[in-house]
Amino acid sequence: MTELLEITGISIFLYMTFVYGVSIFLKDASIVDVAWGLGFIMISWLNVYIMGVHTPLVFVSIIVTIWGARLAWHILKRKISRPGEDFRYAAWRESWGKMFLLRSYFQVFLLQGLIMFFISLPIMAIANNPRESWSLWMVLGSIVWAGGFACEGIADSQLSHFKSNPQNKGKIMTNGIWKFSRHPNYFGESVQWWGVWVISLSFPYWWTIVSPLLLTYLLLYVSGVPMLEKKYEGDPEFERYKANTSAFIPWFPRS
């Protein structure tokens, strides 16, 4: 297990350093968002290459690839339709000034690489335990993952359709699945990694729960909900929506 952790960690470091180099060339640090999902695809199949083919690992690699490819394509399409650096990274570029290149390498790219490593722990746990048969945990985890994938996919699709209508410019999406959660896409992403962790319970590495806990915490309190909602702070329409709608877990509106 130790060797697998080391090889995966070094690979993530090299991958994120490469993405950083591309970001300098493009003058766009927000490409790291596209690289996020693709990085997990790399990790999954690297583990297959190192540890060999066995049913649980290949299955998890497939569902992680489905998740990562869909997410990367969704973000890439958004970047193509709206060229330029995402507002979060543009704000850091302006705030950090001449130190942006150095700080972004450590505080954006390598930090995300470190987070990627910890979130990938269930994949490595599965890789380290070759087995050909299915288990109850695999079935349960697959159901949880599928629910999360559907939630994230539907939320992203509804939001894209909403924003594609020029009449909705400056408005807040409050219909469809967004009626029940202000961030159903983030919720769906979290649920998918809870599903991957449940699959890993087939093996004796319960401590890999740090993966879904870390991702859920980041989405709820750091880089997800707070950072995005700060953009709409003070908007009367958003404040009404915020007062009546669950932030994360889908639930019935308060009024």
Image: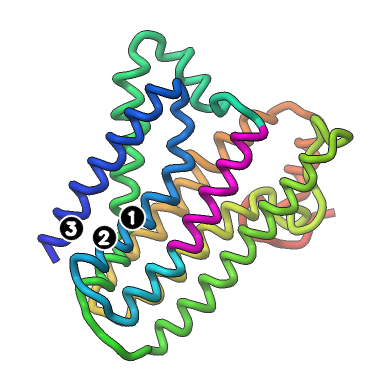
* C-alpha gap between disc 2 and disc 3: 11 Å
Position of residue 54 in the picture relative to residue 155 (left or right): left
User: Which residue is found at the position 50% from the left and 65% from the top?
Assistant: 192
Above or below residue 244? Residue 98 is: above
Task: Tell me how the rendering is colored.
Answer: rainbow
Question: Of marks 1 and 3, which one's residue comes earlier in the chain?
Answer: 3
Do labels 2 and 1 touch, CB within 8 Å?
A: yes
Report crowding for label 3: few under 14, some 14 to 19, many 20 or more residues within 10 A (C-alpha): some
Q: Residue furthest top?
A: 98
* Residue assigned mark 2: 46
Q: Amino acid at mark 3?
A: Leu
Q: Which residues are magenta?
A: 65-81
The circle drawn on residue 42 is 1
* Residue assigned mark 3: 5
Task: State yes or no: residue 160 in magenta.
Answer: no
In the rendered image, residue 112, in percent from the top left (x then y), is placed at: 35, 41
Identify the secondary structure beneath mark 3: helix
In the rendered image, residue 118, in percent from the top left (x then y), is placed at: 30, 54
Question: Of marks 2 and 3, which one's residue comes earlier in the chain?
Answer: 3
* C-alpha gap between disc 2 and disc 1: 6 Å
User: Which residue is found at the position 36% from the left and 8% from the top?
Assistant: 98
In the rendered image, residue 9, in percent from the top left (x then y), is placed at: 21, 50
Above or below residue 95? Residue 60 is: below
